[in-house]
């Protein structure tokens, strides 16, 4: 008989926080920009998406997930693509400083 004890748990264990998300059932177009969207239209859509995020009971888990997997698109946990990149960029700068050398 096969030994299943070493198999990873179901993926649902990693994603069940999404079941409580405020965005569940909301049109995903609110969170992901169409190609070429810029300016006031993008700012307005992102603000509306962030409003959903701000009342979400799992916003922190969502934001942590987006940062951990380096989610490249959309508003996640109340953060836009650019905001996540700024956070990740600062983290990279702190990991390596020319004055301190590579801590690795």
Image: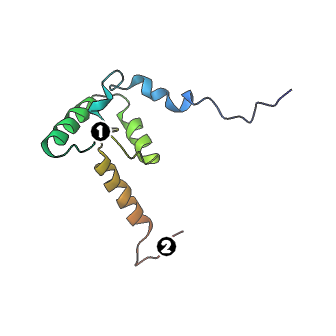
**Above or below, 75 relative to 27:** below
Spatial CA distance of label 2 from label 1 is 32 Å
Q: Residue at x 33, y 25 (%)?
A: 22
Disc 1, SS: loop
Mark 2 vs mark 1: which is more N-terminal? Answer: 1
Residue extending furthest top? 25
Q: Residue at x 34, y 38 (%)?
A: 77
Q: Residue at x 26, y 29 (%)?
A: 52
Residues marked 2 and 1 touching at CB (< 8 Å): no
Question: With 62 as the anchor, is 9 left or right in this view?
Answer: right
Residue 87, x across and y down, in percent: 34, 54
Residue 1, x across and y down, in percent: 86, 26
Q: Looking at this view, is 28 or 20 the one in front? A: 28
Q: Looking at this view, is 72 or 12 the one in front? A: 72
Q: Residue at x 41, y 62 (%)?
A: 92
User: Label for residue 78?
Assistant: 1
Quarter of the image that includes the C terminus? bottom right
**Above or below, 11 relative to 75:** above
Residue 63, x across and y down, in percent: 38, 41
User: Label for residue 102?
Assistant: 2
Q: How is the image coloured?
A: rainbow
């Amino acid at each position: 008989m096969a030994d299943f004890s070493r198999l990873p748990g179901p993926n649902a264990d990693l994603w069940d926080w999404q079941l409580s998300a405020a965005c569940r059932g909301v049109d995903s177009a609110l969170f992901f920009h169409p190609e070429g969207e810029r300016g006031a239209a993008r700012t307005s859509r992102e603000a509306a998406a962030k409003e959903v995020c701000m009342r979400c009971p799992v916003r922190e888990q969502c934001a942590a997930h987006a940062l951990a997997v380096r989610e490249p698109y959309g508003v996640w946990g109340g953060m836009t693509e650019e905001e996540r990149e700024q956070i990740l960029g600062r983290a990279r700068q702190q990991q390596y400083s020319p004055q301190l050398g590579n801590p690795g």
